[in-house]
Image (spheres, helix red, strand yellow):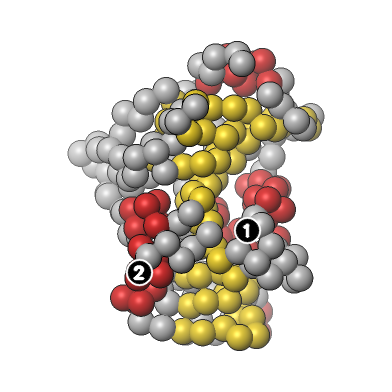
Amino acid sequence: MSTAHTDHRLSMDELAAVIARDIPAGSFVNLGIGQPTKIADHLPADSGVVLHTENGMLNMGPKAEGDAIDPDLTNAGKVPVTELPGAAYFHHADSFAMMRGGHLDVCVLGAYQVAFNGDLANWTTGRPDDIPAVGGAMDLAIGAKDVYVMMTLFTRTGESKLVPRCTYPLTGVGCVSRVYTDHGVFDVGPDGVRIRETYGISADELAHRCGIEAS
């Protein structure tokens, strides 16, 4: 059940700080394109976390701004970034070998849906006008030791993206271990879903809106 509560839902920057706090010190981590890249800006300098980018870099630093911007130094989402001491660069194929080979401790991905058992759908909605964009998500989903998802919990029309069963095409089966959202944090997996924290909503209301059975 809920272990923490705030009186407002979190912004994506606030949520990024929560995830950064939960990443174990010394981990090798990949941050997916989009909102997850914000996490790099919240990692403590002494965390020992080594960020891996799909386009071939280890020990990526926070987002670059002003005079620090180098157009040749970007993350996988083409956002200018900095490099930390000891940074290394390598071929795209080597980067994917790291992702597929179980060398990453954590990856953080966005999602359209996550099922209670940890199934992930994040590459297409399957609609005719949708542009599929799997990128390296499938490789990360099956290769990382822990898969975290960062997303808004509800769609614009109020439906929960945390669902009993994904209705969109799957990226990976049973791969997600934790879901971070603007309204709460959830553990998911073979034993179902458990609410860890809530933001701006009670645990009972959150469970009701997401269709989670009370434990």
Between label 1 and label 2, give the one nearer the viewer.
2
17 horizontally vs 214: left or right: right
Q: How far across and how far down the image is residue 82, in percent?
A: 61, 78
Place residue 86 in its image quadrant.
bottom right
Mark 2 closeness class: few <14, some 14–19, many ≥20 residues within 10 Å: some
Q: Which of 55 and 95 is in front in this view?
A: 95
Q: What element carries label 1?
A: helix
The vertical placement of 29 against 202, above or below, is below
Q: Is residue 71 visible?
A: no
Dot 2 amino acid type: Phe
Q: Residue, x 63% and y 36% (percent of image)?
A: 185
Which quadrant: the N terminus?
top right
The vertical placement of 72 against 76, above or below, is below
Q: How far across and how far down the image is residue 75, in percent?
A: 49, 71
Q: How far across and how far down the image is residue 13, in percent?
A: 67, 51
Dot 1 amino acid type: Ile
CA gap, disc 1 and disc 2: 21 Å
Q: Which of 64 and 201 is in front in this view?
A: 201
Q: How far across and how far down the image is residue 40, in percent?
A: 63, 64
69 horizontally vs 176: left or right: right
The vertical placement of 155 against 37, above or below, is above
Q: Which residue in the structure is indicated by mark 1?
A: 39
| Upstream in sequence: badge 1 or badge 2 | 1
Q: Residue, x 71% and y 20% (percent of image)?
A: 202
Q: Residue, x 77% and y 32% (percent of image)?
A: 4
Place residue 183 in its image quadrant.
top right
Q: Which residue in the structure is indicated by mark 2?
A: 96
Q: Residue, x 57% and y 75% (percent of image)?
A: 60
Q: What element carries label 2?
A: helix
Q: Can residue 190 be seen in this view?
A: yes
